[in-house]
Structure formats: C-alpha cells, structure tokens
Image: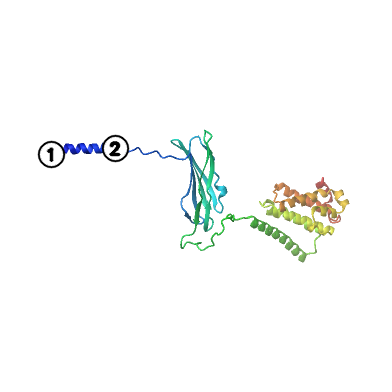
C-alpha cells in the first residue's frame, strides 16, 4: 500500500514538472528581415583561369517596395562576362525574392575584384533607404602541375583586358596580300608576253586585263577590296602609259585635270573615269560593299575609256565606244 502511494506521488510530481517546463517555454520568435536585403556570393573563391564560374546577386525585399537592382556588370573589370540569367520574382510569404546569376571567366591568373553594390529603395508610405552588399575577391590560379600554371599573372587589375582577339589587322594583311598577288600576276603576265613578242600597245594590254578580271574569281569574292584595287590599277596604268602623266600617284581630280579637255568633252569620258576611280576608292579604303552589277559596270566603263582614247589607227571599235557612251 505504501509503495503504491509513493508511485502515485512520483507520477504526480513528474506531471507537474512537465507542465511547468512546458509553460516556461516561449514561442520561437519569427525571423525579422530588413525591408530590402541584398546578398552576393560566388560558387567558389578560387577559380581556374579560362574556366567559367557563377556569381549570384540576390535581392530579398518586402512586397510593395520599389528597388532597382544595381548593374554589377558595369563595375566588373578584368573578368569576362559570358552570360546573365535572371530568376524570379519568387513570392515567399510577404516577401519577393529575385536573383541575377552572372557567368564569369578569369582570362589569366591573378586576383580579381567583384565590386560591392548598393541601391535605393522606397516603400508605399514614402519611406526611403538603401541596401547593398560588399565586394568579393576572386583568386584565379592553375592547379599544381596543370599546364599554364607558370604563366605570367595579372598584376594590375585597373588595366582593361582584351581577351577577344582583334582580327582586323589580320584581315587587312590578307587583303594586301591578295592585292599584291593580283598585281604580281598581271606584272608577270606582261613580262612573259614582252619576252615572247613585241611590246603590246597600252590599250590592248588594258583591254585584255579587264576581260580577264571580269572572268576572275575576284568578281564574286566576298571581299571586294582586291577587285576594286585591280580595276583601279588597270585604268590608272593605261592612262599613265597613254598620256604620260603619273596617274598611279594622283587623285581622281588630278587625273581629270591632266587629261586633254577636248577629249573628255568629245567622248564624255569624265563621268566614266570619275565613277570608276572614286567608287573603287570607297570600296578600297572605306570598306563599302556594292552590288556585283556595279563591279561589272566599272569594267564596262573602263573599256569605254580605253576604246575611246586608243589610237584610231589601231582602235577599230571607235563606233562601238560611241554606242557604249550613249
């Protein structure tokens, strides 16, 4: 009987302690946020040069608050921005969550700085404030034993990098080589003809060169500079040989002033010479692209000039030149 009473007393005491302990417990307070919380992070602080990694900018704000996400990309120097992905907005309880995820790449070994961001917010009551995140340092280096681990590291983060190779100098060099190849081909052809037979008149050489140029692959080439160089060179060499003035080194206006005025007025050649030389210069030096019909028209106008100015005793198509001029 005594044992039973003691058991009951013990059970009552344990129940009282449990109720008292439960009453003393307080409800866990709900986590409170600032009106706008901006956090930035990278997936890893050490990256490998040449391999992409992600940088995330997250904005957590209350509903109804206006907040413009700062442009992080404008302040990033040295790192290559490969892409941007936006996630959200995602509504969680009374807050809105958005993320901007940048895909970055370090071109060389060294230390890079992703600057901190800060922006202004405004709620519906008119209250204002600011929110932002701090800067992040990124260390780019090769793993031990990996190829390229000994290359020169970046020392000055303020110098803008140009990881993308500029192909314009190479394209210009290729254009010059193509032009030189065409000119060398024409010179070699003339020299071979000079060794075999008597020197050809200038108008015959010009007409042959123009016909060959019209049937050459340069007419349909995507790069029109070599064709423009070639047709201008043929016409200038012909005028230089026929009228004894250095047309090769003259401007279009100087060439026209050196031509006999009565010849230009009689055959109306001034417009043809000006059109060929000025239009080809725009393609050569300004890089303008023209339809293929214009290229053919340059050759036809050059043929008109040659036929109209060649010696009459050797130029049978004098009547044809009049028809072309009309």
Check the image and name the residue furthest to the bottom: 195
Check the image and name the residue furthest to the top: 125
Check the image and name the residue furthest to the right: 262
- In primary-sequence order, the first of circles 1 and 2 is 1
Q: Is residue 280 left or right of residue 135?
A: right
Q: Are marks 1 and 2 in contact (CB under 8 Å)?
A: no
- Residue at image position (51%, 47%) is 102
By what rule are the colours in the image chosen? rainbow
Name the residue carrying label 2.
Answer: 22
x%, y% of residue 145?
A: 46, 63
Q: Is residue 176 left or right of residue 144?
A: right
| Mark 1 element type | helix
x%, y% of residue 64?
A: 50, 34
- Residue at image position (53%, 45%) is 118
x%, y% of residue 4?
A: 13, 37
For label 1, count other residues whose C-alpha is less than 10 Å away and answer few (under 14), some (14-19) or many (20+): few
Quadrant of the rendering where the N terminus is positioned: top left
| Mark 2 element type | helix
Q: Would residue 277 be seen by someone viewing this image from the given angle?
A: yes
Q: Would residue 204 be seen by someone viewing this image from the given angle?
A: no
* Quarter assignment of residue 179: bottom right
Say if 224 sits above or below 62 in the image: below
Say if 163 sits above or below 194 in the image: above
Q: Nearer the viewer, residue 274 or 51?
A: 51
Q: Nearer the viewer, residue 154 or 218?
A: 154
Name the residue carrying label 1.
Answer: 3
x%, y% of residue 101?
A: 50, 46
Q: Nearer the viewer, residue 202 or 279?
A: 279
Quadrant of the rendering where the C terminus is positioned: top right
Q: Is residue 260 left or right of residue 106?
A: right
Q: CA distance from mark 1 to mark 2?
A: 29 Å
For label 2, count other residues whose C-alpha is less than 10 Å away and answer few (under 14), some (14-19) or many (20+): few
């Amino acid at each position: 009987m005594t044992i039973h009473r003691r058991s009951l007393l013990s059970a009552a005491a344990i129940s009282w302690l449990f109720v008292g302990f439960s009453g003393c417990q307080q409800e866990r307070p709900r986590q409170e946020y600032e009106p706008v919380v901006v956090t930035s992070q990278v997936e890893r602080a050490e990256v490998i040069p040449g391999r992409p990694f992600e940088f995330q900018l997250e904005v957590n704000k209350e509903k109804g608050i206006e907040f413009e996400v700062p442009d992080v990309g404008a302040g990033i120097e040295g790192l290559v921005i490969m892409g941007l992905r936006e996630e959200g907005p995602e509504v969680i309880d009374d807050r809105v969550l958005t993320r901007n995820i940048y895909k970055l790449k370090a071109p060389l070994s060294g230390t890079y700085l992703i600057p901190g961001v800060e922006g202004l917010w405004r709620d519906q009551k008119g209250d204002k404030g600011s929110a932002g995140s701090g800067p992040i340092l990124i260390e780019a280096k090769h793993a031990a034993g990996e190829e390229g681990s000994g290359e020169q590291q970046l020392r000055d983060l303020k110098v803008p990098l140009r990881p993308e190779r500029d192909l314009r100098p190479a394209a210009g060099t290729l254009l010059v080589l193509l032009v030189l190849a065409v000119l060398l081909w024409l010179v070699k052809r003339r020299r071979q003809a000079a060794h075999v037979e008597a020197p050809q008149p200038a108008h015959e050489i010009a007409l042959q060169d123009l016909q060959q140029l019209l049937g050459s692959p340069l007419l349909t080439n995507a790069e029109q500079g070599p064709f423009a160089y070639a047709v201008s060179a043929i016409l200038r060499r012909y005028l230089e040989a026929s009228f004894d003035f250095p047309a090769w080194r003259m401007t279009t206006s100087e060439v026209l002033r050196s031509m006999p005025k009565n010849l230009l007025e009689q055959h109306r050649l001034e417009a043809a010479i000006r059109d060929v030389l000025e239009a080809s210069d725009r393609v050569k030096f300004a890089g303008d692209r023209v339809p293929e019909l214009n290229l053919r028209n340059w050759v036809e106008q050059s043929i008109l000039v040659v036929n109209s100015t060649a010696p009459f005793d050797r130029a049978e198509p004098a009547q044809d030149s009049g028809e072309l001029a009309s």
